Image (tube, rainbow, N blue to C red):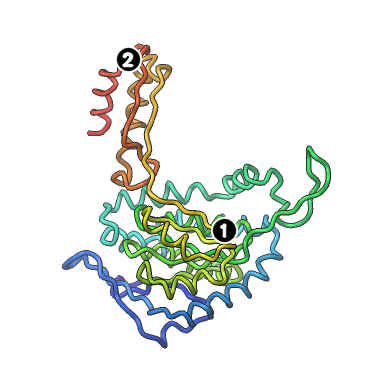
Amino acid sequence: MSTGTAPAYFLPGWEAERGASTTLTFGTDAEAVALRLPVLTPTAIETISHTLLTAQETLAQWPIADIVDVLDRVVQHWLDPQYPYRRYAEALLPSITHYSLPMVQHGLDTLLQAFRKESLWRLLQAEFGDPLVLDRFRPRPHSGGWTRAYGPRLVTHIFSGNVPALPAWSLICALLVKSASLGKSASEEPLFAALFARSLWDICPDLGACIAVGWWKGGDETLETAAFAQADAVIAYGSEATTRAIQQRVPAATLVLAYSHKLSFGVIGREALSSLPLARQTAEQAAYGVSVFDQQGCVSPHLLYVERGGLVAPQEFARLLAEGMA
């Protein structure tokens, strides 16, 4: 794949090449990356949404086991360093995100490894108890009767660009509940979600047809009204102001899940300071959690509380933490 002006969208059912396009440029000089994006209109979004809803009718009939198998195959490809989409992402994401190549590689591996088959089944079991409730009515184990779970037909996602590959979480979870997805990529990082959708299409067109990813300038009320109009649920990532504005534009009957700014902290119990080797290991883990993604992830601690009473005092732990940070 060329790293020239690259397409950063995936819009099945809409001929994006025929319309106007815009370009977002990242980096400078030899490391500059230009991403080409179609200019979406409310009519285009309505057309794309109808296409997604049609594709979801087929997805709704898929056994959950088959969906998990396909997602595992997609993720397995992405974990292969020689996979063309993986190599393409590694070539462009450092200039787009300003993370180093090793950080991009580590981030892709860490996040995507969580979506292998075994992990997906654990996630489904944690959420539903019996994942087969997504396929048919199943007996309730404790209260009697029968139950079945239905996901939204169409989910609109408003992505953020703080952590590479994070959109995979929303898109995969939507597919697990047999929902189609319309994704708005982030201005800060509009590439990965489109690449992931394209790779899914390549491996399984039936599932790939259930995801569309495009871009528009955040806060465009006309486009967002169209994007929310046919959605049964909206998942929004961004600042407090962004998510609040989105919630005001979503129809009252539509479910909204808003993930705005978070401030995380950590607690180091005295049990983790019961020996010097254990305290050093804990400090190294804490240093990693604090430092990864330059604290752009919502679970990176900004503050650590250290309990007194362990063999290693808080002041000594601070010294070990400094070593780990270095």
Q: Nearer the viewer, residue 99 or 113?
A: 99
**CA gap, disc 2 and disc 1:** 48 Å
Q: Residue furthest bottom?
A: 18
Is 188 located above or below residue 276 in the figure? Answer: below
Residue under pointer 2: 312
Please tell me the numbered disc located at residue 91: none
Instruction: Give the percent coordinates (x, y) of residue 239.
Output: 36, 54
Instruction: Give the percent coordinates (x, y) of residue 32.
Output: 22, 67
Amino acid carrying mark 1 in the image: Leu
Residue under the image location 67 percent in, 70 percent down: 58
Is 305 located above or below residue 47 in the figure? Answer: above
Is tag 2's residue or tag 1's residue first in the polypeptide sequence? 1
Q: Determine whether, in the image, residue 259 is placed left or right of residue 283.
A: right
Element under label 1? strand
Residue under the image location 33 percent in, 23 percent down: 280
Please tell me the numbered disc located at residue 255: 1
Instruction: Give the percent coordinates (x, y) of residue 35.
Output: 32, 72
Quarter of the image where the N terminus is located? bottom left
Q: Nearer the viewer, residue 200 or 14?
A: 14
Residue under the image location 46 percent in, 79 percent down: 42
